[in-house]
Every structure is written in structure tokens, then in C-alpha cells.
Image (cartoon, helix red, strand yellow):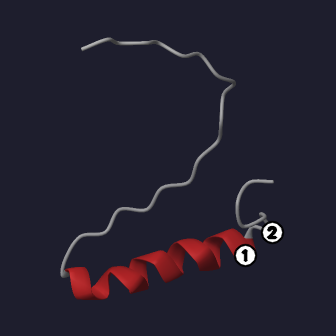
Amino acid sequence: MDVEIINFPKTKVAVIEHHGSPTLENESIKKLVDWRKESKLPPFGY
């Protein structure tokens, strides 16, 4: 297997962990989306 190391500029990311039933995953996603909107951040980091 060939391995290639690629350097790219620092990129800010947002993360939310989901613990629990997979059926409740959308609630965790909604929390992240709500936070993004409250923080006045664009949807895809543009």
C-alpha cells in the first residue's frame, strides 16, 4: 500500500458527538445546525 502525506491549510471544523440510539441521531445534528445558525456561520464554511 502506498502512503502519501498531503499538507493543507489549517481548517476550522465543528464537531458534535452523538451517544445513544441511532434513531435519535437527527436530534444531535439539529443541535449542531442550530449552533451554527446562532453563531452566524455559513452552512459549509464558505
User: Picture coordinates of residue 41 (x, y %)?
Assistant: 77, 63
Q: Quadrant of the C terminus?
A: bottom right
Whether residue 25 sits left or right of residue 20 in the image: it is right
The residue wearing badge 1 is: 37
Measuring 72% from the left and 75% from the top, which residue is drawn there? 37
Mark 1, Cα crowd under 10 Å, few <14 / some 14-19 / many 20+, is few
Whether residue 46 sits left or right of residue 18 in the image: it is right
What mark, if any, has residue 29 been given in the picture?
Answer: none
Q: Amino acid at mark 2?
A: Lys
Q: Are marks 2 and 1 in contact (CB under 8 Å)?
A: yes
Q: Nearer the viewer, residue 12 or 2?
A: 2
Measuring 51% from the left and 82% from the top, which residue is drawn there? 30
Q: What secondary structure is marked by label 2?
A: loop
Q: Quarter-wise, where is residue 33 in the image?
A: bottom right
Q: Quarter-wise, where is residue 19 in the image?
A: bottom left
In the displayed structure, 7 sits above or below 41; it is above
Distance from label 2 to label 1 (Cα)?
Answer: 5 Å
Q: Quarter-wise, where is residue 16 in the image?
A: bottom left
Whether residue 32 sits left or right of residue 44 in the image: it is left
In the displayed structure, 8 sits above or below 30; it is above
Whether residue 38 sits left or right of residue 1 in the image: it is right
User: Picture coordinates of residue 24 (x, y %)?
Assistant: 29, 86
What mark, if any, has residue 40 been given in the picture?
Answer: 2
Q: Residue furthest left?
A: 21
Q: Quadrant of the N terminus?
A: top left
